[in-house]
Amino acid sequence: MMNALLIPLLILMGQVPQRGVQDLALQVDGVGEVLYGISVPNDYDPKDPRPLVLALHPGGTRMRYYGSAYMRQVVAPGVRDLKPIIVAPDCPTQAWSDPGGERAAMALVQFALEHYSIDRRRILVVGFSLGGRGTWFMSSHHPEVFTAAIPMAAATGGEPIEKLATMPTYVIHSRDDQVVPFAPAERNARELQKLGRTIRFEALMDLSHYDMVGYVDALRRGARWVADRWKERAASAFQLTPPLVWNVALATF
């Protein structure tokens, strides 16, 4: 699915950034220019594959490089323990679930995979409000790419429950959210737990929907939880690897 979506031409405007935070643009066939921010750790070494984080911004008044501002203020401090490469596009449409929004986000993920040393077992999508709904959407529609999700202050956008949280998912929502109701989010998480999904729900207090920066501490906890799930998965995969059998009869010394 991903290759069919992403085969169209991707043209970088400017050079691939090496380290630090930069605001750049990507030309995506069928969409046009997509502005995005990217954060590359100062100690990035291609010999050491890094996690990749796709950061999806919320709605509201959208300035140029809105995704980058969201990345700098919320996502980068929230996921810093992962030491990841972060990409944060500006949504070119009204919603991340629109064809153009999906194409832009996944094109940027593909670009990062092609130009950086990424551990494909550790690809996280995280978003707030509109971006949180986009997080549910991306993780549901691209489970072959993402390996964890952190939706914040978000509804599921009508995605079928059987498609939700098929990967480790850490949901964060405030009881005092006056825009996206708390109760349905909590109820959805409970239903997913009953289905045996690997999901954690964190309820916050005294944060309105517009107190986005107030979610940073919870996002740090979510990122650590995701890191633990990745480690468990890696350990499980290692244990399932068949042991090397040494045939003494055929061995020569």
Image (spheres, rainbow, N blue to C red):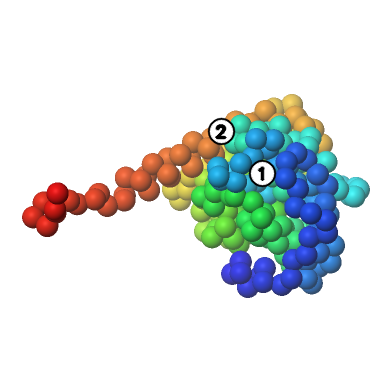
- Please name the residue shown 51% across and 53% down the image: 166
Q: Position of residue 205 (x, y in %)?
A: 69, 27
Q: Amino acid at mark 1?
A: Ile
Of the pair 224 and 218, the residue shown nearer to us: 224
What is the number of the mark on residue 39? none
Residue at disc 1, secondary structure: strand
What amino acid does circle 2 point to?
A: Arg
Mark toward the viewer: 2 or 1: 1
Residue 85, disc? 1
Q: Quadrant of the N terminus?
A: bottom right
Report which quarter residue 6 is drawn in: bottom right
In this view of the protein, which residue sits in the foreground, 58 or 234? Answer: 234
Residue in view at x 69 percent, y 45 percent = 86
Of helix, strand and loop, which one carries label 2?
Answer: helix
Crowd class of label 2 (few under 14; some 14 to 19; many from 20; radius 10 Å): some
Q: Please report the residue visible at 69 percent of the width from the left and 58 percent of the height from the top.
A: 111
User: Where's residue 190, x and y in %?
Assistant: 53, 43
- Other-residue count near label 1 (Cα within 10 Å), few / some / many at <14 / 14–19 / ≥20: many
Left or right, residue 241 beside residue 18: left
179 relative to 176, above or below: below
Mark 2–mark 1 distance (CA, rounded to whole Å): 16 Å
**Residue 116: x %, y % from top left:** 64, 51
Question: Where does the image place residue 122, in percent across and percent down from the top left?
Answer: 55, 47
> Which residue corresponds to mark 2?
224
Observer able to see residue 156? no
Q: Residue furthest left?
A: 249
Sequence-wise first label, 2 or 1: 1
Whether pointer 2 and pointer 1 mark residues with C-beta atoms closer than 8 Å, the reply is no
